[in-house]
Image: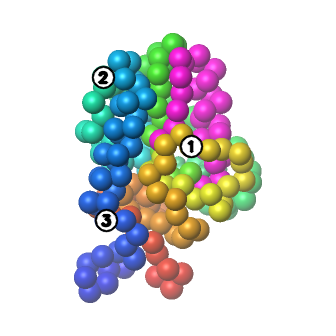
Amino acid sequence: KASESGIFGKILYTEEQIRERAKELAKQISTDFEGEELIVIGTLKGSVLWMCDLLKELTIDTSIDFIKASSYGSSTTSSGVVKIKMDTDMNLYQKNVLIIEDIVDTGTTLTFLLEKLKERNPKTIKVCTMLDKPSRRTTGFVADYIGFTVDDLFIIGYGLDFDQKYRGLPYISYLQPEE
Ligand code: PRP
Ligand code: MN
Ligand code: MG
């Protein structure tokens, strides 16, 4: 629901702040992988906008790919059952792999994906998430590169959805219960 200003929800981070943070992290990643090639894997669907920002700022040679994990349903409790719904098509053997995620919540999705992708024997595998919500974690998962750490809010925009909507908002905002 739009407020008078045409903004959905309350803004947490503007596009400028997000792109600035992507620039900083891309610089760090480019330094960490200097002289190496990197396969950047976006997790569908949430990571696509953040992935674009990072890709444009990386100064090393990159290839891109995508992977989609099945959602484990909207009842947030711990079924812990994740599957790969759409797989990568690149061979990851002995490659540097960077998984791009929009948000780490319980950590279930990335714990699963990391375990699956490690079976393909990449040279290195790291995770860069736009948002980290540590208060919701039920696993020991820790991302290597984190854009912003957020409170336990209902976040939408910049890739994140509510019932598949709002992914295209050019900012990160949150909905309050009455919205
Ligand atoms: C959301 C989000 C992360 C995951 C985080 O994806 O984009 O991928 O959940 O939750 P977790 O840390 O508790 O596993 P979702 O499955 O809703 O798919 P989407 O990216 O297509 O929205
Ligand atoms: Mn996702
Ligand atoms: Mg979702």
Crowd rating for badge 3 (residues with CA inside 10 Å; few <14, some 14–19, many 20+): some
- As drawn, the label of residue 61 is 2
Residue 131 at what x, y percent from top left? 48, 55
Q: Is 80 rendered above or below residue 120?
A: below
Choose the circle earlier in sequence order: 2 or 3.
Answer: 3
Q: Which residues are magenta?
A: 105-128
Q: Residue at x 56, y 43 (%)?
A: 143
Q: Is 128 rendered above or below residue 124?
A: below
Q: In the image, is 80 to the left or to the right of 171?
A: right
| Mark pair 1, 2: CA separation | 22 Å
130 or 68: nearer the viewer: 130
Tag 2's secondary structure? strand
Q: Residue at x 60, y 32 (%)?
A: 114
68 or 96: nearer the viewer: 96
| Mark pair 2, 3: CA separation | 28 Å
Tag 1's secondary structure? loop
Choose the circle earlier in sequence order: 1 or 3.
Answer: 3
The quadrant of the rendering that contains the N terminus is bottom left
Q: Quadrant of residue 41?
A: top left
- As drawn, the label of residue 36 is none
User: Is residue 39 one of those drawn in magenta?
Assistant: no
- Look at mark 3 in the image and give the residue it sits on: 14
| Mark pair 1, 3: CA separation | 22 Å
Q: How is the image coloured?
A: rainbow
Callout 3, which amino acid?
A: Thr
Residue 7 at what x, y percent from top left? 30, 76
Verify CB contact (< 8 Å) between mark 2 and mark 3: no
Q: Residue at x 46, y 57 (%)?
A: 148
Choose the circle earlier in sequence order: 1 or 2.
Answer: 2
Verify CB contact (< 8 Å) between mark 1 and mark 3: no
- Look at mark 1 in the image and give the residue it sits on: 143
